[in-house]
Amino acid sequence: VQLQASGGGVVQAGGSLRLSCAASGRTFSRLVMGWFRQAPGKEREFVARISWSGGTTLYADSVKGRFTISRDNSKNTVYLQMNTLKPEDTAAYFCAASQGPSGDGWRSEYDYDIWGQGTLVTVSS
């Protein structure tokens, strides 16, 4: 499986963006998918993840109520809808796929074994 993220850009505070992550391969529907982000000078942090069926989602407290993760298994794509963006959301956003189990609800980057390239989101104040 290979992942290709897109949709980043520059937006004013309060605005919205939708990120997409397209996956190649036939096993997409069996993968837990996650979004992480990394701001300049900071460590990579968990943003959101979604179960293989889309029935279960989990969010970081910092984005809860503003971001929505979803997936379309027929299109091998996972999305991150980001609303009410804040300057502190500025970061490179990465999608990732997990083929294995997790002891922490797939909130750790170490639970993911396939990563896409980052897409940059810049929120201006």
Image: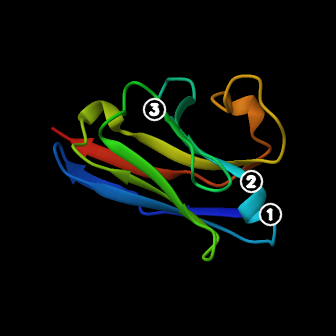
Residue 84 percent coordinates (x, y): 21, 43
Give the residue drawn at x 80%, y 63%: 1
Please name the amino acid that badge 1 sits on.
Val
Give the residue drawn at x 17%, y 42%: 13
Disc sitting over residue 39 in the figure: 3
Q: Alpha-carbon neighbours of circle 3 within 10 Å: few (<14), some, or many (≥20)?
A: some
Q: Secondary structure at mark 3?
A: loop
For the residues labelled 1 and 2, say whether their Cβ atoms are less than 8 Å apart: yes
Q: Alpha-carbon distance for marks 3 and 1?
A: 26 Å
Q: Earlier in the sequence, mark 3 or mark 1?
A: 1
59 or 124: nearer the viewer: 59
114 with respect to 71 (left or right): right
Asked whether residue 35 appears in the rendered view, the answer is no
Q: Secondary structure at mark 1?
A: loop
Residue tagged by mark 1? 1
Q: Earlier in the sequence, mark 1 or mark 2?
A: 1
Give the residue drawn at x 66%, y 55%: 116
Measured along the vertical axis of the image, is residue 6 above or below residue 60?
Answer: below
The image's colouring method is rainbow
Give the residue drawn at x 62%, y 54%: 117
Please name the amino acid that badge 3 sits on.
Ala
Q: Earlier in the sequence, mark 3 or mark 2?
A: 2
Q: Alpha-carbon distance for marks 1 and 2?
A: 10 Å
Residue 106 percent coordinates (x, y): 68, 33
1 or 75: nearer the viewer: 75
Measured along the vertical axis of the image, is residue 118 above or below residue 37?
Answer: below
Residue tagged by mark 2? 31
